[in-house]
Image: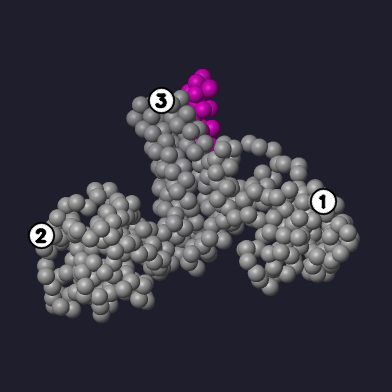
Amino acid sequence: MSQPPLDTIVAVATPPGRGGIGIVRLSGPLCRTVAAALLERTPEPRRATHAVFRDADGTAIDDGLALYFPAPHSFTGEDVLELHGHGGPVVLDLVVRRCTGLGARLARPGEFSERAFLNDKLDLAQAEAVADLIDSGTELAARAALRSLQGEFSRRVHVLVEGLIALRTHIEAAIDFPDEELDLLADSSLRQRLAALQEDSARLQAAANQGRLLRDGMTLVIAGRPNVGKSSLLNALAGFDSAIVTDVPGTTRDLLREHISLDGLPVHVVDTAGLRATNDVVERIGVDRAWEAAAAADEILLVIDDSAGITREDLTILERLPPGPPRLLVRNKIDLSGRAAGAGDGEHGQEVRISARTGTGLQPLRALLKARMGYADGGEGEFLARRRHLDALQRAHALLEQAAAQLLDHGAGELAAEDLRQAQLALGEITGEFTSDDLLGRIFATFCIGK
């Protein structure tokens, strides 16, 4: 793993644009030097100090507050200087230019958090939680991200790793000291410990999947032939009139996207053009985009007009839908058909009966969507997780099961020990204990500048 750098970085830590307050942040060994030149003194540690920010010729750039955090008691573990001034982009640029003139360099995206990781102030899962907390789209996601930042996810991973290490120690001792006649297969506690580890791993996977849903949400594509109520359904789910609704077929000609929350689960809803053959060039492009969106969806809602029943056109669309994403049949317009609202199994799989116009049946639809995505009802996640975390957990769980088979079915202690070692490495990728520099670069490049 890379060694912590020795230079000093600077960046504007507040969003671009004009505002009441703007913050310039520095980290590195030159913070005291910059403070002495810019502020004409070094602020008292961890106390907000009023100061005038001065240019090289002594003229005032801004008037604000300075905060100095000596190493190692700072976010990055290095000397950190924060300059709180007025939030005009020109003023902030002048302050940054003064800092670079004093030897600092412009920070890369995420470099402050990267330094916190390299200086052991945060592990990798906690560092990622910083960005996730900033980007949280719902209240529940923000709370889960904060729990990750406070170390809840890492703690759960470390508990599993400690169990793996203890099991590896037991098995490898039996391999290294055969004269002690440690019969692994006759050890009843070994089976119990293996089973307990597998259960813990499965529970952690389930919790991480919930956290991944809170972070990434789901992409829901609404598809169907024209005039079945797709745009009305989008409006009903969004809670406002996002899409134009008319009786004219082909009103929606392009993808229309809205971000909504289902009890804390972020959902990216995509309304699509009515799927039909058409000679209209613009509408045909919209239909092609609708098929592309359906192929990339986490879930497809195939909407039909229940007052007309399932038509030949509906069946053609159903047969042509991409095989990957799961699909849910939505029988809309039950206010016209007289069918009762609700959900259940139908001839074409799971279906739900609603009226997008009146709102009848929308709650069963929301509940069914959450259940199909594996989102726990009530929804408060224990921590936030990313897809790479899930991948590492899945690999670790598969290796754990493989180790159990090698040991209990074949008596192959050496192979079981190696599988457990590989499982430990996979879990170490989550917290950054076993992580390549290339992966670190990709992760921190997604952060905003100044964080």
Which label belongs to residue 11? none
Contact? badges 1 and 3 (CB < 8 Å): no
Estimate the spatial distance between the alpha carbons at disc 1 and disc 3, rounded to whole Å.
Answer: 63 Å
Residue at 51 percent of width and 41 percent of height:
427
Quadrant of the rendering where the C terminus is positioned: bottom right
The amino acid on which the numbered mark 3 sits, given as a three-letter code, is Ala
Which label belongs to residue 312? 2
Does residue 118 sit above or below 130 in this rendering? above
Estimate the spatial distance between the alpha carbons at disc 3 and disc 2, rounded to whole Å.
Answer: 59 Å
Which label belongs to residue 102? 1
In the rendered structure, the answer to whether residue 117 lies left or right of residue 42 reads left
Q: Nearer the viewer, mark 3 or mark 2?
A: 2
* Mark before the other along the chain sequence, 1 or 2: 1
Residue at 37 percent of width and 76 percent of height:
240
Residue 368 picture location, percent across and down: 29, 64
Q: Residue furthest top?
A: 179
